[in-house]
Amino acid sequence: MLAWQMRCAMRMNLSRSKPPVRFTIFRSNYKWDTVGTALFLGLFSWFSAGLSGIVNATIAFDQVVHNTLFIVGHFHQMALEGIGFAIIAATYAWLPEFTGKKLYSDSLGKWHIWLTFVGQMGASAFWMAQGIQGAPRRWAVLPDQYLTLTHISLGFLAVLVAAQLVFAYNLWTTLRRSPFDDPTAVRVHGGTQAD
């Protein structure tokens, strides 16, 4: 009975929130650059992790997933994507402001954001699935019955690591550039001032 009530409550809340979201984002001049994409995906991830937190707060479900990989998946989804995307967006937004150097590649920034999102959402989803099946947390080696899902989640973690290498390359190249390398910058008394 509780699951049915939860589904009805979530449907009612989601149906109320669709028109404002549609009118605020899709009919606005929202910039879908690296920073805007990171903030949007961070909010989406925070919302979806919050839903799994609400479900986890029920006593009946908590007895099933307590001290399992479900908790690990929920935490990493909330921490990396909810909080991490805000930090990443701030880095992409403020690094050019603080250094006076234009970001090396906005395209690489978007690749980084999307690969991070796909890698972490996939890993978290498989960890949560393993937790529902009873996979214990804080074990160095899981029992063989969880091996398949563990290998799939490792593939998503490889995508996540590759995304962070793209991030490091983009930042490293941005910091190594001279402000004079930016062809769109306007020269002012020996310095540069971006448009």
Image: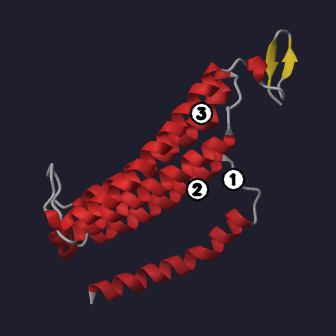
Image position, residue 180 (x, y; %): 78, 18
Residue kind at label 2, given as amino acid type: Phe
Count of labels shown? 3
Specify the quadrant of the image occupied by residue 15.
Answer: bottom right
Local SS, label 2: helix
- Above or below, 141 against 148 in this view is above
Q: Disc 2, disc 1: CB below 8 Å?
A: yes
Identity of the residue furthest to the top in this view: 190
Q: CA distance from mark 3 to mark 1?
A: 18 Å
What crowding class fits label 2: few (fewer than 14 Cα within 10 Å), some (14-19), or many (20 or more)? some
Residue 42 in view here: yes
Residue assigned mark 1: 32
**Quadrant of the rendering where the C terminus is positioned:** top right
Q: Secondary structure at mark 1?
A: loop
Of 98 and 59, the residue lying toward us? 98
Pick whichever of labels 3 and 2 is earlier in the sequence. Answer: 2
> Pointer 3 and pointer 1: residues touching (CB < 8 Å)?
no
Residue on which the image places disc 2 = 40
Mark 1 nearby-residue class (10 Å; few <14, some 14–19, many ≥20)? few
Q: Which residue was labeled with disc 3?
A: 170
The mark closer to the camera, 3 or 1, is 3
> Which sits in the foreground, 113 or 79?
113
- Residue at left offset 39%, top offset 63%: 50
Quarter holding the N terminus? bottom left
Residue 120 is situated, as x and y percent measured from the top left of the image, at 42, 54
Residue at x-position 59% and y-position 33%: 170
